[in-house]
Image (tube, rainbow, N blue to C red):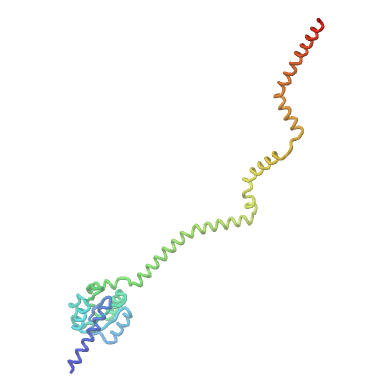
């Protein structure tokens, strides 16, 4: 009767261990000989949600590990064994076991497995010396924040300089409005004066003096014709005289 009862219990224990091996990211096997129940409870609390710490029989653990496809832990199944199944950050679990062992030397890390690869006790200690995922993420976020802040400052510098320049111009214009009012006048004045002069020349009527001056300038062109008429006059008189003389002779 007792044997019949034992078999279902063992099968349930193996099934539970198999599920833990399959779902966990890794496991650290420890020897807990000499630890009190109170100390084990304290260890479970210190690991928190990152690990589930459970005592198991070596024979059942070997069967469950084989069913879950976990290799490399058979040699660790010697003496009383308790397993920390890693559900969270493995670095946090390794640190928790290390810190607890400092005050409780009875806890001895045998080794373990992480992501399907066996871990020696030395590798577990090295894992405990690493920074946790939370710390690494915080550092990465801080570094990214610093880079973004630097980039923002680089982009904001020209804008702030431009803003100061505009503010200085506004202040100067407020104190002396002529700076803005006369800004375009010097360049436009010559053109305006030239246009005004040309307009005056095009629309004003010539005076009598201007007409006389224009006639005087044009006289040299007419002078040759007048001289020719003057030269021709004596010839005409001479011909008339000859004709008159001839008439008297007749």
Of residues 203 and 130, the one nearer the viewer is 203
**Quarter that holds the N terminus:** bottom left
Q: Is residue 67 in sight in this rendering?
A: yes
Of residues 237 and 57, the one nearer the viewer is 237
Give the answer, above or below, for where 59 lies relative to 218: below
- The picture quadrant where one finds residue 4 is bottom left
Counting from the top left corner in percent of width and height, residue 233 is at 76, 16
- The picture quadrant where one finds residue 31 is bottom left
Left or right: 130 in relation to 2: right
**Quarter that holds the C terminus:** top right
Q: Is residue 106 in sight in this rendering?
A: no
Counting from the top left corner in percent of width and height, residue 146 is at 42, 64
Please count the marks in the image.
0
Left or right: 43 in relation to 172: left
Counting from the top left corner in percent of width and height, residue 238 is at 77, 11
Of residues 38 and 111, the one nearer the viewer is 111
Q: Name which residue lies at 64% across and 56% down.
A: 175
Give the answer, above or below, for where 202 lies relative to 73: above
Give the residue furthest to the bottom.
1
Q: Name which residue lies at 40% across and 67% down.
A: 142
Q: Name which residue lies at 81% across and 8% down.
A: 247
Counting from the top left corner in percent of width and height, residue 81 is at 22, 82
Of residues 180 and 81, the one nearer the viewer is 180
Give the residue furthest to the right.
248
Give the residue furthest to the top.
249
């Amino acid at each position: 009767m007792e044997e019949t009862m034992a078999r279902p219990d063992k099968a349930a224990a193996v099934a539970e261990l198999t599920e833990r091996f399959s779902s966990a990211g890794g496991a650290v096997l420890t020897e807990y000989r000499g630890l009190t129940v109170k100390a084990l409870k304290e260890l479970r609390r210190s690991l928190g949600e990152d690990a589930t710490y459970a005592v198991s029989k070596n024979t059942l653990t070997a069967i469950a590990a084989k069913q879950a496809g976990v290799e490399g832990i058979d040699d660790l199944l010697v003496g009383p064994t308790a397993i920390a199944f890693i559900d969270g950050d493995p670095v946090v679990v390794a640190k928790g076991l290390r810190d607890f062992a400092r005050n409780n030397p009875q806890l001895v890390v045998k080794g373990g497995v992480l992501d399907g690869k066996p871990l020696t006790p030395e590798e577990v200690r090295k894992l405990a010396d690493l920074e946790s995922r939370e710390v690494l993420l915080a550092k990465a976020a801080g570094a990214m924040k610093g880079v973004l802040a630097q980039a923002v400052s680089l982009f904001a510098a020209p804008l702030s300089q431009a803003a100061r320049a505009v503010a200085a111009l506004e202040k100067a214009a407020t104190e002396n409005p002529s700076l803005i009012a006369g800004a375009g006048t010097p360049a436009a004045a010559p053109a305006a004066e030239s246009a005004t002069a040309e307009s005056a020349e095009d629309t004003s009527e010539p005076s009598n003096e201007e007409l006389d001056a224009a006639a005087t300038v044009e006289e040299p062109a007419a002078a040759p014709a007048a001289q020719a008429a003057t030269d021709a006059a004596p010839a005409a008189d001479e011909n008339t005289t000859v004709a008159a003389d001839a008439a008297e002779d007749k």
